[in-house]
Image (cartoon, rainbow, N blue to C red):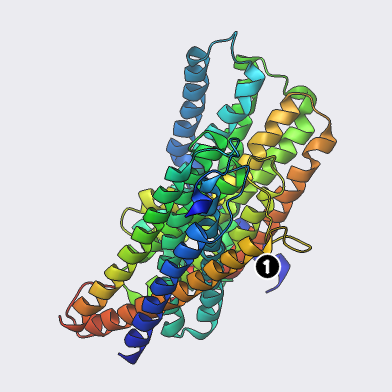
Amino acid sequence: MRSPDLLRHAWAVASKDLLVEFRSRTAILSAAVFVVLVLVVFNFGRDPTAISNVDLAPSILWVTFTFAAILALNRAFQLELENQALDGLLLAPIERSSIYVGKLIANLVFVATIELIGVPLLALFFNVPVLSYLLPLGALIALATIGFVAVGTLFSAMTVRTRFAELLLPVLLLPFMIPPLSWAVLATGRVLAGRPLSEIAGWLNMLAVYDIVFVTLAIFLFPATVNE
Amino acid sequence: MRMLRVGRWITAIGLALLAGVYVRALAFTPVEQSQGLAQKIFYLHVPAAIWAETAMILVGLASIVYLFTKDPRLDRFAASSAEVGTVFCAIVLTTGPIWGKPIWGTWWTWDARLTFTLFLFLLYVGYLLLRSAIPDPAMRARYAAVLGICGMCEVPFIHLSVYMFPTLHPMPIVLQPGRPKLPWSMLSTWLLSLGVFTLLYVGFVVQRYAVSYFREQLEAAGEVGHA
Amino acid sequence: MNSWKQRGKSDMPENGNYMIAAYILVGAILSGYALSLYLRARRSLRP
């Protein structure tokens, strides 16, 4: 498996998916609307004297990002399945792993777009000091997102062929999302509260290890999900 | 057929010895002073927890070998270990709160250990659900193997979290570096219980394996749904 | 069973009921599962 080919093919797969999504735009719009909805609801639902914005912010952030991820993942292989296009993809002279990496990239771009919308909106509506912590926050968000999107992309290849696919995917994914998610939420809280970086270094390390382990694992396991 | 009989015998002996553990733990093991009688739940809770996690690791290992060899016996074993693991996990999840309520004052707390036992349970449920959602045996075995391997790799991360979070949960006193801190009177009961749970795991898995095998025969003969 | 009765140490909490509940529950789960395996095997053997 030669690396330049792998990446090139992966990028081809990814750009196909992103092009389709960009043309129809439904998923990204629903996710964006959901972000605004959550922000508005949380604003009305809390007592400003009892709970500070900074305490609530991590949870709000990660609820919206997770939803966006699930939305992207549910659609990841659906398009191919509907039009028997998966066979075409499999017949193409590319490594199976490139399909996975391509899908992963497309899903990550989707979720990243939502995150790029969500973080500024959160900063705006809730007056949370995001700019001063942009780098650690960005690293945290990136690492955690890669974690659960990597596993989710692998699982969506499987669940798309079962009945109740949209129901089964979140159920399967839940135990795999919680470790990176809980680390991310805790660390986000610390970052926004202005704690020193050394406190979150441990969590960043664990997230990085998690990502390396599961992306590698998924690349090796993906062919088993599409081999006939 | 012989496998089924062996499995039943092992289970029967296991259950009989379990009764012995009950008697020993309840009547002949000293009471822990600070926690009171409720501490005795420990003798059932911890061995069950050990096997709940080990069963998942075994599912993962069997899954890895299955993906290389495609031997259906490994898939049957994985399915069996998963089901038995779920039962033991349920025991941990129920005895945990029952032990926690008198000691910590609350049924549930999002303490790392309890929470991640919950996630182990969710891993098991997901695995069993995935299996039941795929009618084709070859695809079912392959997909279950993928999930099983991921599940097994998830377990160390679950373990890692125990030592990272401040927690109400008692720190490990038996399985820790250095010698166990328990007095022999309690340790011996615990070891006995661990042995019984091991026996029960084996007996249950062997029976469940046999059930899998019979159902596959019936399926092949076109007589019934799927395993 | 003398060990169940307090020997003048009044600081040990009275939580024997929880212990009993847990032990009964575990016994029920394990026997119940053993029974279910037995019945499932029997049902598979005589379709």
Tally of marks:
1
Q: Tell me if A3 is positioned left or right of B221 in this view.
A: right
Q: Residue at x 59, y 58 (%)?
A: B154
Q: Position of residue A83 (x, y in %)?
A: 35, 59
Horizontal side, residue A182 vs residue C24: left or right: right
Quadrant holding the N terminus of chain A: bottom right
Chain identity of mark 1: A
Residue B70's place in the image compared with B107, above or below, is below
Mark 1 = which residue? A5
Residue A123: image x %, image y %? Answer: 66, 20
In front here: A116 or B188?
A: B188
Q: In terms of depth relative to the viewer, which is nearer, B118 or B193? A: B193
Pick the front one: A151 or C42? C42
Can residue A161 be spotted in the picture? Answer: no
Quadrant housing the C terminus of chain A: bottom left
Secondary structure at badge 1 equals helix
Instruction: Please say whether residue B18 is visible from this viewpoint.
Output: yes
Residue A173 position, x and y percent, is 49, 51
Mark 1 packing: few (<14 Cα in 10 Å), some, or many (20+)? few
Q: Give me the residue at 72% from left, 25% from top.
A: A192
